[in-house]
Amino acid sequence: MRGFIYTFFLWIFVISCSTINKKHTTISNSNTNSDTLRIANDSLEYEIMIIEPGFNSWILTQRPRGFYTETFLENRNRIYVTEYNQRVLQPQRFDPLLYEQQINYDPTISYGYEVNYLLYNYFIYFEQQFNQRFIATRGRRY
């Protein structure tokens, strides 16, 4: 089966009860060749894990942090997460090996710039890597 050749593993857990204090956010990545990127805060109000071969080296070639505003990233992530979650719920239409589980992203919570930047870029990477299209935009950079 075609789906078995994908080595896609995405585990994003965004769990929170209150607004995140940005200065407690930590990012763990042993080196740039690692396939796992973990973002969490000290009190574990949320955690994001991106396990994807090549993502960490790919993101180094993208627009730098600070290029986009946090509002832009939050708005795009809201759209991407909604579409992604809809695809998870339709395994007969979308590859269940690509869309394994829903992303719990609450737009009323301020996750901070770093979380939104990495999540947004992961969706761009996902679109490119797996030939998927979530939203139609004019002037797409790739």
Image: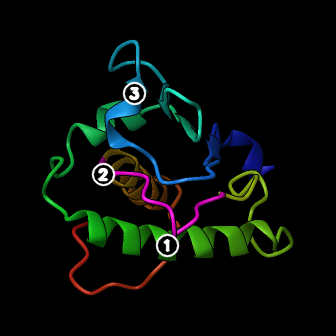
Q: What element carries label 2?
A: helix
Badges 1 and 2: C-beta atoms under 8 Å apart?
no
Q: Do the residues labelled 2 and 3 touch (CB within 8 Å)?
A: no
Observer-nearest of 131 and 78 = 78
Q: Is the magenta stretch mostly helix, strand or loop?
A: loop
Marker disc for residue 27: 3
Circle 2 residue: 113
Q: How many tags in the picture?
A: 3
Q: Return the disc, 1 or 2, that comes first in the chain's sequence.
A: 1
Snapshot quadrant of residue 105: bottom right
Q: Is any atom of residue 13 visible in this view? A: yes
Q: Please state the extent of the stretch shown in magenta in the rendering.
A: 104-113
Residue type marked 1: Arg
Left or right: 57, with 103 as reference point: left
Closer to the eye: label 1 or 2: 2
Which callout, 3 or 1, points at the residue further toward the start of the chain? 3
Q: Which residue is drawn at 55% across and 30% down?
A: 43
- Residue depicted at 41% across the width and 85% down the height: 136
- Whether 96 is drawn above or below 65: the answer is below
Q: Is residue 110 magenta?
A: yes
Identify which residue, 92 or 22, lies in the foreground.
22
Q: Circle 1 sits on which residue?
A: 78
Work out which residue is located at the far right of the displayed protein and give it: 92
Mark 2, residues whose alpha carbon is within 10 Å: few (<14), some, or many (≥20)?
A: some
